[in-house]
Amino acid sequence: MLAIVMCGGRGSRLGFVEKPMIAVGGKRLVEGVMEELELVGLETVFVTSPFTPETERFLREMGLEVFRADGGGYMHDLRQAVFEYRIIEPVLNVNSDLYFRERGIILRFLRAYLSSSSPAMSAVFPSGRRVGINAFDPVLGEQREEKFIIEESRVTNIDTPGDLERLRDGRVL
């Protein structure tokens, strides 16, 4: 199984900043995702775009596998990476704008996915809002999706200035 980390968004809701490079507690968001993925031990590809040159430079300097998509949008860039790497087995897909308050969340998600009979799984908050951690079989097309519930106190998806402010203030979202 391959892990794909999406790092190419425009960051428009945060004033067009490169979200993977935002530092919280002295660590970039993408570094927190890397630490989580180290626990699962999967080969990982970081998908950037023309909108995230600093992120791409940072990842390449670390010697990591980077694929530059064309920046056509999240799903477009994800499909582009799946096609480019000729992925025909299930894939783990993680957003790079997640802040983990607890270690092992991706590992627990992956264990749940691998023990499930469902071809797809998405991590969601109790409200139903997506977290940004998914697994799916790219060969099957549209597929039944199981939900993996994660409490919002364990991980934060940084989408808005309010999310970032609450995180930096130490308030649970």
Image (spheres, rainbow, N blue to C red):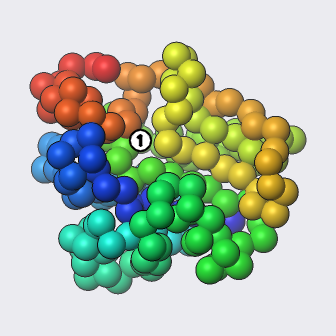
> Is residue 71 toward the left or the right of residue 50 in the image?
right
Q: Nearer the viewer, residue 32 or 45?
A: 45
Q: Nearer the viewer, residue 151 or 127?
A: 127
User: As shown in the figure, which amino acid type bears the numbered disc 1?
Assistant: Arg
**Residue matched to label 1:** 103
User: Where the C terminus falls, by quadrant?
Assistant: top left
Vertical position of residue 52 compared to residue 162: above or below: below
User: Where the N terminus falls, by quadrant?
Assistant: bottom right
> Is residue 95 toward the left or the right of residue 137 in the image?
left
Would residue 27 be seen by someone viewing this image from the given angle?
A: no
Q: Quadrant of residue 18?
A: bottom left
Question: In the orientation shown, which residue stands out farthest toward the top?
Answer: 127
Q: Quadrant of residue 168?
A: top left
Q: Secondary structure at mark 1?
A: loop
Q: Nearer the viewer, residue 140 or 100?
A: 140
Q: Residue at x 62, y 65 (%)?
A: 79
Would residue 65 be seen by someone viewing this image from the given angle?
A: yes
Q: Residues within 10 Å of mark 1 (few under 14, many from 20)?
A: some
Vertical position of residue 89 compared to residue 103: above or below: below
Q: Position of residue 150 (x, y in %)?
A: 52, 27
Q: Position of residue 115 (x, y in %)?
A: 79, 42
Q: Residue at x 58, y 35 (%)?
A: 123
Q: Quadrant of residue 42?
A: bottom right
Q: Position of residue 111 (x, y in %)?
A: 68, 44
Q: Nearer the viewer, residue 42 or 143?
A: 143
